[in-house]
Image (spheres, coloured by chain):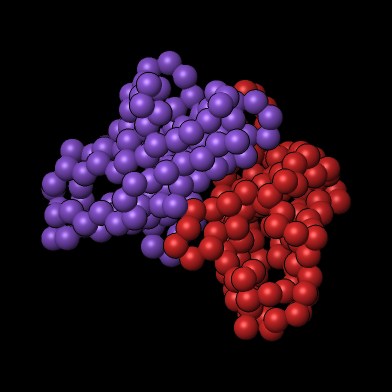
Chain colours: A purple, B red
């Protein structure tokens, strides 16, 4: 079985400041890693994913995450946030084989202050 | 093209009643997942269909919950004798299952409130 821990339930930052949302996972088998975003009053959207290869993955809107196998982490970072990044962010894992059902963390609410 | 749709968007019911929640996946997607998101929590897996069959129902909390997908497309999640603890947003996702990795596309969810 897998589990995901998001260490911060809420993260307030000022606009244009850097941010890091932390995620640690536990699994006895190989997993894929994901960050999903849920904007206010919208559904879950895939932000970025790690499947294999380069441990640093990027999204189209400036977020990046780095897979660290030894620390079992997949932290999400952005060097300069915008008001429009205000959302709930979920880290998730799925087994590489089988149903690939997603196991989510509890979420981190990112609030951007002007 | 059209994304995953779920109906109704909101459902209010009384304790003990029966409810059905519907999911229309993206056309051609053979895999369909149901998740439940309680307030302040991340989504939790309920059940996975590959085609018409439930390939993994390990997340269903008890026998009051049941889901079907009779023609391999639309799926219905059925909850009998609803309890206040069933109140949550129920999410549906579909994926094409054509390779080693298959992105899941989520619907907007059905918010169920049990009074």
**Can you give x and y, in whole percent of width and height, for residue A15 in the image?**
15, 53
B85 sits to left or right of A49? right
Q: Quadrant of residue A60?
A: top left
Q: Quadrant of residue B67?
A: bottom right
A92 sits to left or right of B104? left
**Can you give x and y, in whole percent of width and height, for residue B69 in the image?**
81, 51
Q: Which image quarter holds the C terminus of chain B?
A: bottom right
Residue in front for this viewpoint, B85 or A100 = B85
Relative to B28, does residue A73 appear above or below in the rendering?
above
A6 sits to left or right of B91? left
Q: Is residue A16 visible?
A: yes
Residue at figure coordinates x 75%, y 59% from the top left: B62
Residue at figure coordinates x 17%, y 42% from the top left: A18
Relative to A70, does residue A86 appear above or below in the rendering?
below
Which residue extends farthest top? A53
Residue at figure coordinates x 55%, y 23% from the top left: A30
């Amino acid at each position: 079985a897998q589990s995901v821990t998001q260490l911060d339930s809420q993260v307030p930052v000022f606009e244009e400041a850097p941010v890091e949302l932390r995620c640690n996972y536990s699994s006895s088998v190989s997993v894929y890693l994901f960050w999903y975003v849920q904007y206010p009053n919208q559904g879950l959207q895939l932000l970025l994913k790690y499947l294999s290869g380069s441990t640093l993955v990027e999204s189209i809107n400036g977020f990046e995450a780095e897979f660290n196998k030894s620390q079992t982490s997949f932290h999400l970072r952005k060097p300069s946030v915008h008001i429009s990044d205000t959302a709930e962010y979920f880290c998730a894992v799925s087994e590489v084989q089988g149903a690939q059902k997603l196991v989510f963390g509890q979420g981190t609410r990112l609030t951007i202050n002007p | 093209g059209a994304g995953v749709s779920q109906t109704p968007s909101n459902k209010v019911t009384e304790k003990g009643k029966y409810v059905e929640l519907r999911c229309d996946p993206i056309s051609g997607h053979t895999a369909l997942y149901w998740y439940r998101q309680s307030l302040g929590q991340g989504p939790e897996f309920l059940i996975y269909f590959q085609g018409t069959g439930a390939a993994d129902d390990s997340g269903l909390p008890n026998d009051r919950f049941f889901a079907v997908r009779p023609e391999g497309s639309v799926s219905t999640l059925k909850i009998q004798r609803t309890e206040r603890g069933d109140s949550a947003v129920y999410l549906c996702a579909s994926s094409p299952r054509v390779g080693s990795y298959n992105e899941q596309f989520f619907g907007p969810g059905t918010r169920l409130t049990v009074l």
